[in-house]
Image: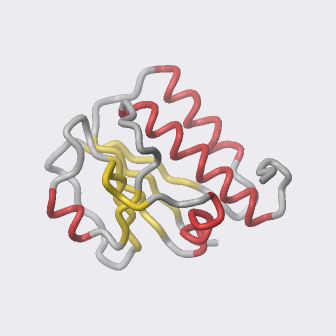
Amino acid sequence: MPRLRVVALSARLPAWAEEACAEYAKRMPRGYAVERQLVKPGRLSLDGKCHIVALDERGKDMTTEQFATLLRRETTFVIGGPDGLEESMKKDAALLMRLSSLTLPHALAQVVLMEQIYRAATLLTGHPYHRA
């Protein structure tokens, strides 16, 4: 299965958010694993070969089924800090997507992203978690 990464530009998550993200990572179906990485702003360096999905409030809306297709290849999801992502990161990304039309706090955005990755992986493996 493809390698999946979540790279977040921020300080450490509050305990409730870290616990939720770790729980979704632990639940991933066989063949799916998510590497999570916290990076300080200005220190982000990504492998140009991977498919980069940058989260941005002005990005594309996706259904769960559309989102699930992103898990079929090596993908790195990048979440900006309190001020979002630098323009250069947005331009380098293969896709700009948003989790919601609402502005989400950084910690909550990470939890929502991890849940959606888990949901998409269960959809692809035929697990009944996603009941749409």
Q: Which residue is rendered at x = 66% and y = 60% of the image? A: 32
Quadrant containing the N terminus in the rendered view: bottom right
Tell which of 71 and 56 is nearer to you.
56
Q: Residue at x 45, y 44 (%)?
A: 100
Answer with left or right where residue 63 lies relative to residue 88: right
Relative to 85, is 13 on the left or the right?
Answer: right
Q: How is the image coloured?
A: secondary structure
Kindly give the residue lying farthest to the bottom in the view shown.
49
Q: Position of residue 78 (x, y in %)?
A: 35, 54
Report the residue that reaches farthest toward the top.
Answer: 15
Q: Residue at x 36, y 36 (%)?
A: 103
Residue 58, by quadrant, is: bottom left
Q: Please give the count of numbered marks on the rendered protein.
A: 0
Q: Which residue is situated farthest in the front direction here?
A: 101
Q: Nearer the viewer, residue 71 or 5?
A: 71
Q: Is residue 31 left or right of residue 57?
A: right
In the rendered image, residue 27, in percent from the top left (x then y), is placed at 71, 44
- Residue 129 in percent (x, y) is at 80, 48
Residue 83's image quarter? top left
Q: Is residue 36 above or below residue 92?
A: above
